[in-house]
Amino acid sequence: MSDLYARHRSVLPDWLALYYGDPIEITHGEGRHVWDSDGNKYLDFFGGILTTMTAHALPEVTKAVSEQAGRILHSSTLYLNRPMVELAERIAQLSGIPDARVFFTTSGTEANDTALLLATTYRRSNTILAMRNSYHGRSFSAVGITGNRGWSPTSLSPLQTLYVHGGVRTRCPYASLRDADFIAACVEDLKDLLGHTRPPAALIAEPIQGVGGFTSGPDGLYAAFREVLAERGILWIADEVQTGWGRTGDHFWGWQAHGQNGPPDILTFAKGIGNGSSIGGVVARAEIMNCLDANSISTFGGTQITMAAGLANLAYLLEHDLQGNARRVGGLLAERLRAVAAQVPHVREVRGRGLMLGVELVRPGTDQADPDAAAAVLEATRAGGLLIGKGGGHNTSALRIAPPLTLTVAEAEEGAAILETALRSLS
């Protein structure tokens, strides 16, 4: 046990998860690579949990942060803040939500917490619809709507949460149905559920479930849900903490794969927009955002140093068409992984889109999740010089692959080769 690991264990909570039997300390990074304290170099296919979205030590972001730090780091929302207004203007325009207002937080958890506050206040209801296998953060209210037992340490909650089918296409009672029939069955389930409860405030859903193992329903599922919800005045909250900013390749926001009936009423974001800086936020129609009848501020949400990072990062992403790169390179990576999967009995499915790909592992010849295999692959890829993630609502048996959006074709091939070796090593 390293000295730092021993110190970690003695002063931090037991439930603070660490990867690897011998945890590593990452000391610095550049581009798509990071180095640990022993000098080992890794290709990073997880980006600090989808947070280093463009690249490590991106010069444009580093310069913006350094220049802002030389002026002022922070003043709070009690004062006018030019970088915050400028970033809010850009996000409001990109969101697709009409008459949009933006509120900045410091994390995705806090963003989802704010969205729940807005929805329950606007609708005067504490009932929330959420998806099975979902994850929305670690605050008291966010845990209360999380449909993944591994990340929900308490059943106590200020909300009444009802869980809906549809977030996992290939593991649910409707898995055998064609996409159109799957959607129809989920809609009927939703209608039936709504007939047995008080009027809910909102449905909150990740277009692609993150911690759940990069699972999703068919395109158009949430559009079909939206039609039912809108008839009853129920709001739709799109949790874009992991799917936003072009990561899925096909769309800038994950909700756009379900946009036939318009944008969500509320959108939450975080992670990648700051490229490592602590930025989260909520976008909502003005009538919803302005429904609170008491004063509020955010001490650190929208602080100048993080807004400078967000502005520079978003500008780089748009100017270099990183959404297009995610689509192109992600498509090649997915094809490569599916070719490997066809030859490895442990692989049940390769799924996702863009640079947000999941590889679910099972015991060969069965449909039973194999968390030990996932843990073994995580260790083997690390030994081979590749960092990936894991997740999934079925015993954490899915590998999560989400590199920075500047990933090159050569780096995608390199990472796929390391992952192939790790997968083929499973006995």
Image (cartoon, rainbow, N blue to C red):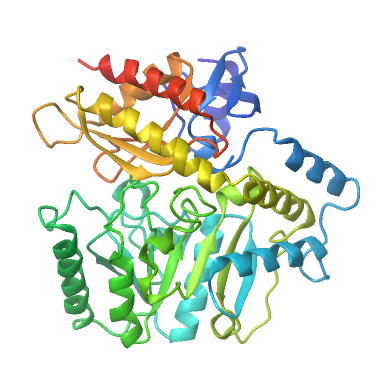
| Point 19% across, 81% down: residue | 196
Up-down relation of residue 195 to residue 178 (above or below): below
Please name whichever residue, 320 or 76, is drawn nearer the observer in this view of the structure: 320
Residue 190 percent coordinates (x, y): 22, 73
Please name whichever residue, 98 or 69, is drawn nearer the observer in this view of the structure: 98
Left or right relative to 38: residue 75 = right
Please name whichever residue, 84 or 114, is drawn nearer the observer in this view of the structure: 84
Give the mark count.
Answer: 0
Observer able to see residue 162: yes
Q: Quadrant of residue 70?
A: top right
| Point 13% across, 58% down: residue | 174
Observer able to see residue 372: no
| Point 49% across, 84% down: residue | 122
Residue 217 percent coordinates (x, y): 27, 57
Q: Quadrant of residue 375?
A: top left
Left or right relative to 229: residue 279 = right
Quadrant of the frame with the C terminus: top left
Residue that sits furthest to the right in the current view: 71
Up-down relation of residue 248 to residue 335 (above or below): below
